[in-house]
Amino acid sequence: MNNVSGYFKKPTQFLLSAVQPRQYPNVVFPEVAFIGRSNVGKSSLINALFMEKLAHISNTPGKTRQINFFNHGDSLMVVDLPGYGFAKISQKEAYKISDLVSQYLTTRENLKKIFILIDHSLGPKKIDMEMLKSMKSIKEKIFICYTKSDKKVKERSPYLKDLEKFDQLIVSSKLNNNIFELQKKIAEIL
């Protein structure tokens, strides 16, 4: 795609929230999904990529409990998946959300790329590695996106080496660092 910036200026509209697969939109264009630990900056990144306030940014991590679909320019479906990790929800609710996400990731035919977001200042955690392990059947769709590069690295993760086999990029929604590079990566699937 030649005009990446122009493409991302197209309108993006919230389509629907799904809590069951039968509620997924019936569309023919490709999908890109975003997932990460609670408080990883997923909503901020989606908003920076599509240059408008689409995903709700909350002070309370784990607010997204359904799968949110956004239509970008009638040519791309943007999917905001529930975060995983320390959200204050019951174990029953956590299992329900986990099953919903797992079913989406493994059965959605239009899904072309899964952006796994990891906080750059903390590095990958055990829970990130468990999530990646659960996606081994679709590993060719995975792209690691380290968020919050504007923050100082607090700790060195022992799992960094395990992620070298995946395509990856370090970004900052706050400073717009590498946002254009990530837009180009998304444009490659169109």
Image (cartoon, rainbow, N blue to C red):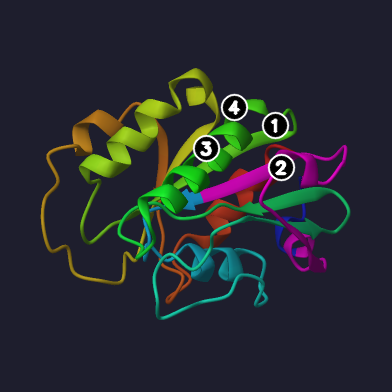
Vertical side of 110 occupied by 52: above or below: below
In the image, 97 versus 25, the foreground residue is: 97
Give the residue at x 53% y 34%: 102
User: Mark 4 and 2 residues: CB-CB less than 8 Å, in contact?
Assistant: no
- Spatial CA distance of label 2 from label 1 is 9 Å
User: Mark 2 and 1 residues: CB-CB less than 8 Å, in contact?
Assistant: yes
Q: Secondary structure at mark 4?
A: helix
Tag 4: amino acid: Thr
| Residue tagged 4 | 106
Disc nearer the start of the sequence (4/2): 2
| Residue tagged 3 | 99
- The reply to whether the magenta stretch includes residue 17 is yes
- In the rendered image, residue 129, in percent from the top left (x then y), is placed at 29, 35
Disc nearer the start of the sequence (4/3): 3
- Spatial CA distance of label 4 from label 3 is 11 Å
Tag 2: amino acid: Glu
| Residue tagged 2 | 31
- Spatial CA distance of label 1 from label 3 is 14 Å
Vertical side of 79 occupied by 11: above or below: below
- Spatial CA distance of label 4 from label 2 is 13 Å
- In the rendered image, residue 110, in percent from the top left (x then y), is placed at 75, 33
In this picture, which residue range is highlighted in magenta? 6-34
Q: Secondary structure at mark 3?
A: helix
Q: Nearer the viewer, mark 1 or mark 3?
A: 3
Residue 189 falls in image quadrant = top right
Residue situated furthest bottom in the rendering: 59
Q: Is residue 99 left or right of residue 175?
A: right
